[in-house]
Image: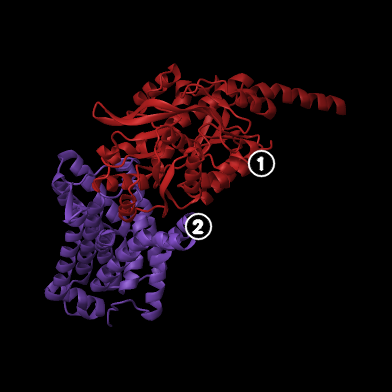
Amino acid sequence: MLIVEQVLNGLQLGVMLFLLAAGLTLVLGIMNLINLAHGSLYMIGAFVAASVAGWTGSFVLGLLAALPAAALVGMAIEVVALRRLYARDHLDQVLATFGLILFFNELVSIVWGPRALFLDTPRWLSGAVEILPGLPYPAYRLAVLAVGLAVAVFLAWLVRRTRLGMLIRAGATNREMVAALGVNIRLLYTLVFGLGAMLAGLAGVMAGPIYAVEVGMGEHILILTFVVIVIGGIGSIRGALAGALLVGLVDTLGRAFLPTLFGAAMGPAAASGVGASLASMAIYIVMAAVLALRPRGLFPVHG
Amino acid sequence: MNKRLIALAVGMVLATSPAAAAQAVKIGMITTLSGGGSALGIDIRDGFQLAVDQGGGKLGGVAVELIVEDDARKPAKATDIAQRMLNRDKVDIMTGIVWSNLAIAVVPKVTRAGVFYISPNAGPSLLAGKGCHPNYFNVAWQNDNLHEAMGQYLTDKGYDNVYLLAPNYPAGKDALNGFKRFYKGGIAGEVYTKLGQKDYAAEIAALRAAKPDGVFFFLPGGMGISFLKQYDQAGLTRQIPVFGPAFSFDQTILAAVGEAALGVINTSQWSKDLDNPANKAFVAGFKAAYGRLPSLYASQGYDAARLIGAALAATGGNVADKDAFRDALRAAGFESVRGKFRFGPNHHPIQDIYVRQVVKEDGVLTNKVIGKAFTDHADAYAALCKM
């Protein structure tokens, strides 16, 4: 029973990571840009949703306001700053986007103040649902799971079945050739970046009622997100989904069961230390193992 | 001739010293004003500034110049700023640091340079015990104190199966050690989580399975907000009560947690409803100046300034006579907003620690004192301090 609940928890964390990883992997895989400021877009999504929901009392309106806001901010930074960085070294990109993190953290604390904001679950999702007899599970977490899976299906359809998706794939393989065929590649990149930003904003909104909505909230989760896309294979949506679910499950199950396992072996005092430390390391161990066996990730993008 | 020159020189020095005394005493404040956790530093600064403003730019009747710099919660940045304040600005007194790891990096440098450091928050055990220093004073608490108080409270209330939760870093371990120093009941489970962790679903499921009669947690900042929200969503708020130090139920945090915090018991050395004239003046002044309710951190910043003010008043603003100024600080001749206050032998507070409950006042979540966990409580490390 506990295992079922913990697996669900793991899947839900994985789906949350997927929402962030999908945008990041698209930008990194297709535009070859390392965007550390992805977490800032997640933060902006959460803050906009929290304030709109605070004014109107409606979570849905908050969500509807946050998505275009994150997409617009994303496209603005692509046009203003990142466009100049595509041809540059990855180190320059890391420096510039790290600067953007500082900029957005400061901007958010100027606009909203330094204190954390409040974003509640919508009333119709606030209770718990009995998924198995005697096993209540928060309805909101189930909703996050559903939203994440819906986004995965939508992205698969977008990339594989639509003209935009075809252009995205073509642009990733050979940028110059696509441009020579008369496609406005700059506009395409801006759109892709906006899509990634919107997904980050969506992740921020979904995270708001569960996690703290505070300045700097995007940084911790960004590290996990990078682990996800490295495991999944850079540029692959399928890889991002697989990597995210794997990281979510390993992290949650590790935290849930490693301390107990060690407790049986070596007594509670030592175990809580060793177990907790090992649980924090688990995802990195998994990442190292995956990279040792498949250096380009689980689902490498061919080309 | 020579003698006359010396006499002249001495005369000049004597002539300039009243001018020097009239010059403002320089106070360097290093605190966290940007990034995560900046709400705490900003409240410390605002509380301190309020005391200066109430004195018309003076503390204890002596003009002060406050130099404030942002450490962004980074130890390396804090040590750089400290170096600059000591060498270039030649500050007389320093204060402001929020986090224990930054305090451990900065404070020994400052005190060794012969400058006084007044801590408005961080109280790591190292600086209270073996690493204590005559020039170091902590006006808030030693890190363990509020956790110890909660341990005592739960023992008094007869809890016998409590689940413990803290982040896996030194202050988290100190917290649970402090709690266990005074908690005598059984322990249902003891879990150390990752520092900065956001998702507590796994821990909450395990906790529910352990069926404790209470939960004690120390998860400062955003971690506590996330934990409480998720605990509430899991439907546990009405089933298993949570307890913690004031940090997770402070004014800077309550609005973000929402109704999930209502009714929770927490321990603190200060509360805005403590009935004494200094506190009334502080709370009203803070609200008027900044348009928000003061937090625990603001009260500590305010007390730090007023402690300095009392010592400046007693010495007539002469910080150069270190021994006299130190004695004046040690006397703590100010009205603390928490009521009774004095320093122990290691320059850490001996004070009462209260039990508070989160209530709703005029639609705003805040705390109300409902009892006292300790009277004249001193920290556990004083004996290790050799000054």
Give the colour in which the image draws chain B: red
Residue A294: percent from the left, percent from the top?
36, 80
At numbered mark 2, what does the secondary structure look like: helix, strand or loop?
helix
Chain shown purple: that is A
Between A11 and A47, the one lying in front of the other is A11
Percent coordinates x, y for residue B123 in the rendering: 53, 39
Mark 2, other Cα within 10 Å: few <14 / some 14–19 / many ≥20: few
Q: Looking at the image, how many numbered discs can be counted on the residues?
A: 2
Q: Residues within 10 Å of mark 1 (few under 14, many from 20)?
A: few
Which residue corresponds to mark 1? B112
Picture disc at residue A270: 2
Label 2: chain?
A: A
Q: In the rendered structure, the residue with mark 1 lies on which chain?
A: B
Res A175 → quadrant: bottom left
Residue B370, horizontal then vertical, whole percent: 37, 26
Check the picture and name the quadrant holding the N terminus of chain B. top right
Residue A97, above or below B113: below
Does residue B90 appear anywhere in the picture? yes
In this orientation, which residue lies closer to the viewer: A292 or B172? B172
Residue B49, can we see it? Answer: no
The three-letter code of the residue at mark 1 reads: Arg
Q: Give the Cα distance between marks 1 and 2.
A: 37 Å
